[in-house]
Image: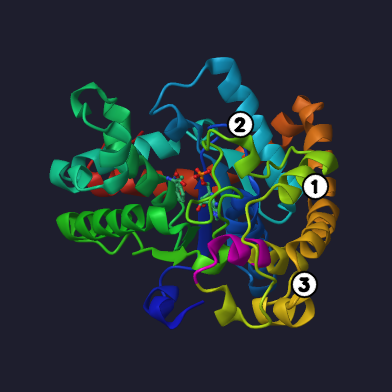
Amino acid sequence: MSDASANQTTKFQPRVFSGIQPSGGLTLGNYLGAMRRFVDWQERGLNEGFETIFCMVDLHAITVWQDPEALRRQTRELAAGYIASGLDPAKAILFNQSQVPEHTQLAWIFNCVARMGWMQRMTQWKDKAGKNQQNASLGLFAYPSLMAADILVYHATHVPVGEDQKQHIELTRDIAIKFNNDYGVDFFPVTEPVIEGAATRVMSLRDGSKKMSKSDPSDMARINLTDDADAIANKIRKARTDPEALPSEAKGLEDRPEARNLVNIYAALSGKDVDSVLAEVGGKQFSEFKPMLADIAVAHLSPISTEMARLMEAPDEIDAIIGKGAEKAREIAEPILKKTYDIVGMIRS
Ligand code: AMP
Ligand code: TRP
């Protein structure tokens, strides 16, 4: 754990929490930028003796309209993606947000701590609500307060997220600090964001300046975790590149976003750094490099898509795993919520 958190580890045990919205479609970007990092945290937690908790945040997903059947399927698909990527229910807690009611119970209290002005400043709110804020759901506005509750109902100290979520983690810290001040307690930890670096950002296969995203209108821009070997190879073959050969040093990738992206993906999937990849492939044309990348991508992703497909055929197995996960999550969340109610002045029988 970082030095910055040393002041907390005396009172708050390190604990890692993160979540992904089951809003449909998982890409290589989600895998390299989020799920694979979660698996690293799981292993580290096991070695160093702290808990790791990962969630499908379905209550966040419904802040914008979701078809009910699609939501159920997407939630199971995300669970299958987590498991197929290496999250192990015996090592980490894996569950669905709405199955642990303590999240929404704490969120209400945080709604009364957080200020309207704080929410109004959130860039995700401004982006998602667009011009017609009056017509956005109240849930979309209060979204960061529920996110703070997700984290703080476990007293989580570290939250691995993408850069776009940094502002929400800062708001989580503000809520914890204001709660502690308002009630004169030292009850909620001031959580550390663990931000994904640029190196783990996977860009579109059609435009190296845009993030690879499930919402890109072109399916050729992304590799889906459910793509089969042919689809993966085809998308890599057709990926946009420039006419130059690959450089032998990283600085030769500056101003070549598409080339840089493909090399980054190769490096991430092979577990090598960019310099050693370029030492190996420098001077090659894309016609030679792309099949190498396709091979490694297929070798790495095929077992994941196969396991996801198997689990999607066994929804009962998924439901049993996340049901047990929710029980384990509640064992941690329930006493923390009870203590919060005591602090706030609610009668408990
Ligand atoms: P989203 O699918 O945008 O809700 O993101 C879910 C998680 O995946 C977040 O932790 C993101 O930071 C991560 N993620 C999504 N797309 C990418 C990408 N192209 N590169 C790296 N990480 C990503
Ligand atoms: N807002 C996050 C996203 O869109 C998802 C999320 C909800 C989350 N609750 C969380 C992430 C708690 C980390 C911790 O990516």
| Residue 274 location (% of width, % of height) | 66, 76
Q: Which residue is mark 2?
A: 75
Residue 289 disc label: none
Query: Is 81 situated left or right of 297 in this image?
Result: left
Q: Which residue is mark 1?
A: 233
Nearer the observer, 109 or 143: 143
Residue 262: in magenta span? yes
Is residue 170 something one can see in this rendering? yes
Q: Residue at x 79, y 41 (%)?
A: 305
SS class of the residue under badge 1? helix
**Residues under numbered marks 1 and 3 in contact, where contact means CB atoms less than 8 Å apart:** no
Instruction: Give the class, few, some or many, for how many residues have Cα within 10 Å of label 3's Cα (few <14, many ≥20).
Output: some
Is residue 14 something one can see in this rendering? no
Question: Which of disc 2 and disc 3 is earlier in sequence?
Answer: 2
Magenta segment range?
Answer: 255-263
Q: What kind of residue is marked 1?
A: Ala
SS class of the residue under badge 2? helix
Residue 284 disc label: 3
Residue 197: in magenta span? no
Nearer the observer, 71 or 219: 219
Q: Residue at x 29, y 25 (%)?
A: 137
- The dominant secondary structure in magenta is helix
Against 250, residue 241 (above or below) is above
Closer to viewer: mark 3 or mark 2: 3
Q: Quadrant of residue 3?
A: bottom left
Question: Which of disc 2 and disc 1 is earlier in sequence?
Answer: 2
| Residue 70 location (% of width, % of height) | 59, 20
Query: Is 83 situated left or right of 303 in this image?
Result: left
Q: What kind of residue is marked 3?
A: Lys
